[in-house]
Amino acid sequence: MKAAPPQPAEARRVHVTGVVQGVGFRPFIYRLARAHGLRGWVLNGENGVEIQVEGAPAALAGFVRAIETQAPPAAAIATLAQEPATVGGFDDFVIRESAKKHRPTVRVSPDLPVCDDCLAEFFDARDRRYAYPYINCTNCGPRYSIVLGLPYDRPQTTMQSWPMCELCAAEYHDPGDRRFHAQPIACPQCGPTYYLRTDESTQRGDAAIDAAVELLGGGSILAIKGLGGYHLACDARNAGAIERLRERKFRKERPFALMVRNLAAARELAALSPAHERLLQSMQRPIVLAPARLALEGVAPQNRELGIMLPYTPLHHLLFARGAPAALVMTSANRSSEPIAYRDDEALERLSGIADAFLTGEREIARRVDDSVASAGPYGPIVLRHARGFAPQAIVALPTRRPTLCVGADLKNAITLVVEGQAFASQHIGDLDHYGAFAAFKETIADLCAMYEVPAGDLLVVHDAHPEYASTQYALALAGDHLAVQHHRAHVASVLAEREAFEIEVAGVAFDGTGYGDDGTIWGGEIFTGTLRGGFARAIALREARLPGGDAAARYPVQAAAGFLNELDDLPDLTAAPFDFPDRYSKALRIARSGLRTFTTTSVGRLFDTVAAIVGFTRPITFEAQAAMWLEHLAWPSPTSDAYPFPLADRRLDFRPMLAAVVADRRRGRDVAEIARAFHNSLANAVVEAVATLKPRQVVASGGVFQNALLIELLAQRLGDRFWINQKVPANDGGISLGQAAIASVYSGAT
């Protein structure tokens, strides 16, 4: 019997987009092609990975299928396109040098946690990278935080000044090795190391690690250089160390994040569901919010949750292995509200007086990237701070070809750059009223525009409608065309953008603390109708109240309460027990009644502050939304299912009957947790009843108020699958720029 004749060779040109650079994708393609007996080449292009491959038709088909089914764990394929090509008669399959012809649109990989294979080597005393804190391979290690330009190759990273030794070079060029084309590859002989600096001495290598562990165990505060910046670390069970950290950092009550040795240590501290554990162990390794099991003095005052993360760098694992406390406070290295320090010289200057010692790595950080924060919601993971592990993801594809820069809002700022329809969301930047954050904002804009080679004059620049925002004024000074987008419409659009839902008719609920409204007043309790493509009309809003003193009312709940309670008749003396409002309330009430220095608002955020003040939060806040968070955590344990009246009248949600009932309950001595829970129930009911009058296909919700997990839970119970919330970007103002991008993409001048 004759053997079947060999199949004639065919050729394919394959183009893959997504997170496909810096994640071992070219080596994967190389090995895959060799395994299928194919010839050709693969290279990194500005728009993804380009592959020319030829061989038997069956082998080509199997190769293409395997690209999607066997891709490296850190890769995320967005598109895979193939077309017939001319057979080139190649002798082998090779990795070619990266191509550079046009503007890059490749999706840069976020930073990756150290992988299990590297950890096995890391803890093997026979391995040449034993205990080396910069160990990495194609499946793990730094990416975005070291990239200087695209395509992603070693000369375009902060490893460019560390030539590979002979052994590392051999691994780098060996297609069968796990470090084949791993750009940050290094070892103790050729790579950077860590050193510990104190006032008395400087130690390097193992001695530095051991000294750092001893300092942490002894109650010292260390500045530790990580992937995207420095952390301030101390023993989470040392109340004295935590108190000193709060005093030095000027962080009075905002919760600290924790890093724990392993999952078992996390389970000791928090009640973890399977969803929490999946998030903790995910490729992003975010800080995960979970209910506390233990009270750690000073870590998260008056808060039912702890923010916990697992080690994600070799250095973190090494510190714990050498005996560091099993739970460390690991907070951003800055003074309160400043951006995280990431350059060595600035860290020494800014953290002097806070840190007792500095554990500094020699590899430079290209850009600051803070830790991400996430929670497990009723519909899956929710990103509360979009940073390390997530940024700079292309969140969605938008229907525009024009490069578009969206500068976000002034609080919790993040920006979005749209290139060839791909919306790249930046890392969390911060509040732009602080000089350092504003400088970081400008750096991030310049950084992303340079990385994707977008000339300023080509841009459509999108900004908030608030004329006095620092982000607005900066945007208007940039070259290019400009577009203003109203704050709360951007919130609603951000939810729809995540789902690429341009035509679906929705009721869009936007509840937050403040935003510039169409009429120049302070909005914050809005319900819109419409579609992303067709626009959103304001249909329902919270009844207006007066806000005495403007922005200052956001810092003093009793001051906000004065404006809302002024709308009620027959109020009792709230300066007397059980309310015990301070003098600031009486002064604010007189201002509200006079009409001087008052502003009209529909803010649900200030309504939360008002209820919090009535049930006991009568002091100033020390961080944003503290009173509202306190009210939420107070409400969680209460089993009450009743609700206060919160009627809809003349397209206004009337808070007056609800507040009158809250005041009455507080006066008669009802348990404050029950009052807090009944308020949440009433707000959820009010939303459901209001949107029912609009008969939408879907209900979407965004804005800072919808970081409230209890409110989301209550609405999810009532609305089920008809309810959409932010999941990929924060519901707070960190998601505004994505909403701006979505609205701009359907703007007639954006094509």
Image: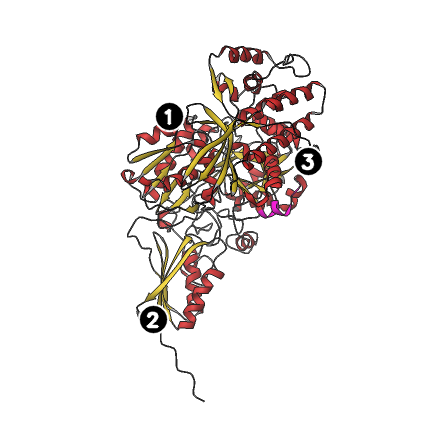
User: Could you tell me which secondary element the residue under label 3 belongs to?
Assistant: loop
- Measure how far apart labels 3 and 2 are at the Cα level: 64 Å
What is the crowding at mark 2: few (fewer than 14 residues within 10 Å), some, or many (at least 20)? Answer: few
Picture coordinates of residue 413, whole percent (x, y):
44, 33
Horizontal side of 361 relative to 631 (left or right) equals left
Dividing the image into 4 quarters, which one contains the N terminus? Answer: bottom left
* Residue on which disc 3 sits: 294
Q: Is residue 367 shown above or below 572? A: below
Residue 276 included in the magenta stretch of the image: yes
Residue range (magenta): 271-278
Earlier in the chain: of badge 3 and badge 2, it is 2
Please say if 427 is above or below 137.
above
How far apart marks 1 and 2 lie (CA) works out to 63 Å
Q: Residue at x 28, y 36 (%)?
A: 480
Disc 1: CA contacts within 10 A as few (<14), some (14-19) or many (>=20) = some
Confirm whether residue 53 shows in the render: yes
Q: Of residues 411 and 113, which is closer to you in this image?
A: 411
Name the disc covering residue 63, or none.
none
Q: Helix, strand, or loop for circle 1?
A: loop
Percent from the top left, x then y, of residue 123?
57, 52
Check disc 3 and give the amino acid type: Leu
Q: Position of residue 648 (x, y in %)?
A: 56, 28
Most extreme residue toward the bottom, as rendered? 1
Which residue has dot 2 on it? Answer: 91
Quadrant in the picture for residue 431? top left
